[in-house]
Amino acid sequence: MTKMVLRTPDGRSLPRPASTLRVQAPDAFAPDPPGGLCAHPALLRGVLDTLAARLDAMMDRAEQDETLSVEAQSDLIRAVGLGQALVTGLEGYAAAPDRTLLERLSDLAQTLALLQPDEARLSGRVAAIAGAAGHAWLEGVPLLPDEDAPMITLTLDAAQAAGIRVGERGEARLTWAGVRRPAPLRDPLTPLRAALTPPATLDAGRHGTGQALQRLALGEREGERNAALLLLFVCGRDRLEDLPLILALDRALVLLRALQAQEPTPATAHLLELHAALHAELGRPDLPLAQRERRQASGDLGGQVLAARRTLRALRFGRLRPVTPEAQEHLNVLWDALNDLDEDLSRGVTPDRDPDLRARLLLLSLQGLTSTARAPGLRLPPMVQLAAQVSGVDPLWAWERTQPERFTSGPLHGHLGRAALPLELLALRGTPFWDTWGTEVRRLTALAGGNLLASVRRAGLRLPDQAFLEGYLGGFGPLRALPMDPAALNAFHAALLRLLPDAHAQAQALAAPAEAPVLPQEAANLPPAGPTRADPTPRPVPATPDAPEWPAHVLGVREHLRGRRMVLLGGVPSAPHHAALLAAFELSELDWIGSAEYAHGTHAQAHVTPDTAVVILAIRWMAHAHNTLRDVARARGVPYVMHPGGLSPSSVAWQIGRQVSQQLGQQAGQDAGPALPDNTGD
């Protein structure tokens, strides 16, 4: 609700009650008139002029804003080129409607929305144009960077064929964005079949299915080829991650039914059989497109073939896309929590004795899972998998109902992130910041926690370890019974933004090094005792005492590893830590492969021998270089641990017990020692 004070032309207030006007702003923009933008020239002109002005503002910001990262500046430059093509292309479509041009506009708008979320409404406006033209199946597919130039060129060529030229100012924007327009080598709308083909499955049980689908993908009819390629994504899911397999199954079934109804062949019947088998492997999840098509068949086989091709392009984009800023931010926050976990473990403190950290890890784990497309047999991104294992969450918890785009009351990962954010501020207790803002932090924590629990309850779900969360979050204040409405969410975010600058300043003050004591002149003139260097990113592990009293979780792992061999990949091997790990677990051998020694997995087979009890992958140092060793360990049935922390025995032992306790217990037998709690999450 906005309150406006009305005045006369000379500035005097009008007499009450006519002196004020209250305006209720809508929660969302009103839809475009029937037919969409291009059916209303005056509206189209206004939208295009506004977009052109925003493109100029993007150029100014890219040139003048010194706070921009290189990636953000690159995104602005891309957005200007794509946006100018969208401006000209919309004019061209209004002059001469064409389905192929509309496909291009849809992809340009979708990509622009990803680069600059403030422009997201354009995707909806292009979708309204497509719906009015009878192409309701048309959904935007984001472009990869190397597809920008050909898509821009082909869009401008289509507009020129309709009598629309770019104009001097538009050419200046394209030149500024680095767009050069020779003839494109390949139209992004029709990529080669090889570009749309996923990697083949390594699962021996699906080799036959994969080979059959590969043969069908070579057929003469595009509809059958597209259906086979979609099913290959489901078949090869063991080598893929974060892809919407439900969408692939759904789109394939709609297409196959259309083929069976209009142009049935033995190949179509075979594909339907393979589809049914793969659908059963995933537990027969609901397929909403197929359900809707069964109720109201469109009869548009050509449209279904094109829709399947566009879904294949979207899956290709999902495989090759860069990390989004939101995903990178979540990764950074997760690393902060894992660092705190490692500090606790180095002191012998496990998460069950630190409820703040336990709650953060649980919420961040669920946030990662619910922002990732999941399915049985589909790989998880390494850090999402690790977070689930550390927090003891089943990676397939409510997987079908919590897909990123399917949660009933808004994205669940948004509710989880909102609840996790105030918990980061609890580390500032006992500081001047807390004296000022502590009460407000507690209020916001209870507010976000109540919103999360109410949203989950409304969806008919129950979070893992929800009883703990209810008690923990309830300790900050009364929990609301209903989810927050848009106005309450806006108020929550505004309140959080008010305190974040002070929180950031306090955190910086705590992280600043203490001032060095003033030395006598004689001492000040002495040379330094040794070379100085910046602290490395991985936190140093405290020295191990001569005769430590190990906590229970270390002793439990020792019972399973005594007299056995362990492989450790990552970090810089050091004699003290090597000796500490040998002694703590009473190993017969520790094969420690340093980061600098690891030759991209070429010697993985030699390190993972049949007598290896467990493989530790120190992912803090190795990033994705551990994949080969992990695959070899999995193939040989050797348990492997993705370890994010330092290499103290306490930290390593806790991760072993958390991630591979069941496998170690099976190896050692029931009489080898006390069983560890099963928290593998695999």
Image (cartoon, grey):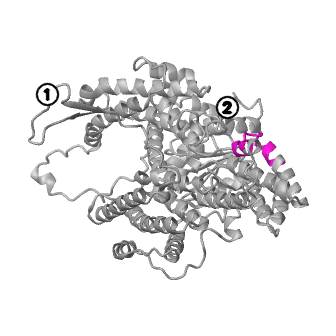
On the rendered structure, is 526 left or right of 653?
Answer: left
Residue occupying image coordinates x 45% and y 74%: 164
16 left or right of 207?
A: left
Picture layout, residue 144 above or below residue 30 = below
Mark 2–mark 1 CB contact (< 8 Å): no
Q: Which residue is mark 2?
A: 678
Residue 682, can we see it? yes
Q: Which region of the structure is painted magenta? A: 277-292
| Side (left or right) of 62 relative to 247 | left
How far apart are labels 2 and 1 at the CA level? 74 Å
| Dominant secondary structure (helix, strand or loop) of the stretch shown in magenta | helix
Find residue 15 and name its label.
1
User: What type is the residue that disc 1 sits on?
Assistant: Pro
Residue in the picture at 27% in, 40% down: 501
Q: Position of residue 412 (x, y in %)?
A: 54, 36
Give the image location of residue 566, x and y in percent.
65, 48
- The x and y percentages for residue 232 are 75, 57
Is 271 magenta? The answer is: no
The disc, 2 or 1, on the residue closer to the chain's N-terminal end is: 1
Which residue is more in the foreground, 514 or 190? 190
Residues 597 and 477: in front is: 477
Of badges 2 and 1, nearer the viewer stands 1
